[in-house]
Image (cartoon, rainbow, N blue to C red):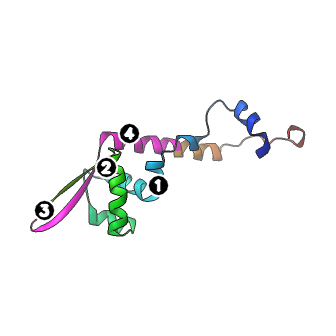
Amino acid sequence: MSVDDSTTALDEQEEPHPTQSLDDTVHQRVRLGILTIAKEADRVEFGFLKKQLAVTDGNLSRHLKVLEESHLITVEKGYAGRRPRTWISLTRDGAQALDAELRALRALVRRLETPRPRSSPADT
């Protein structure tokens, strides 16, 4: 199948391409990292995320704001002793969005790993 056969390809496929299920808010590298790390714990501290994801304070803050505005995480500010801290927790919507993203990525991997018949020159 060639790129020019895109209409034929869509007719032959019953399901949309797995990349159509990827969520732009979740799929971005840093945000995906935030969600996966937050899923591993009840809540995660800002400094830990910053170190694990190798980002600046400002960069991490911006990604947290996007996720919070999308209701995928909650951000809690407080103190540990006298030191200010920020903790991040995954919401139910965030867990569902992460699960959907992982399903889409698995579908994409399966698609690439499943042998498919190659089209012959007569088909193009």
Q: Earlier in the sequence, mark 2 or mark 1?
A: 1
Q: Residues within 10 Å of mark 4 (few under 14, many from 20)?
A: few
The Cα atoms of the two marked residues, 1 and 4, are separated by 16 Å
> What label sits on residue 51 in the rendered view?
none
Magenta stretch containing residue 99, yes or no?
yes
Q: Amino acid at mark 3?
A: Tyr
Camera-nearest label, 4 or 2: 2
Is residue 39 visible in the rendered image? The answer is no
Q: CA distance from mark 2 to mark 3?
A: 20 Å
In the image: residue 111, left or right of residue 87: right
- Which circle's residue, 4 or 3, is located before the other in the chain? 3
Frontmost of labels 4 and 3 is 3
| Whether label 2 touches label 1, CB < 8 Å | no
Q: What is the crowding at mark 3: few (fewer than 14 residues within 10 Å), some, or many (at least 20)?
A: few
The image's mark for residue 68 is: 2
Tell me which amino acid carries mark 4.
Gln
**Which residue type carries mark 1?**
Gln
Q: Nearer the viewer, mark 1 or mark 4?
A: 1
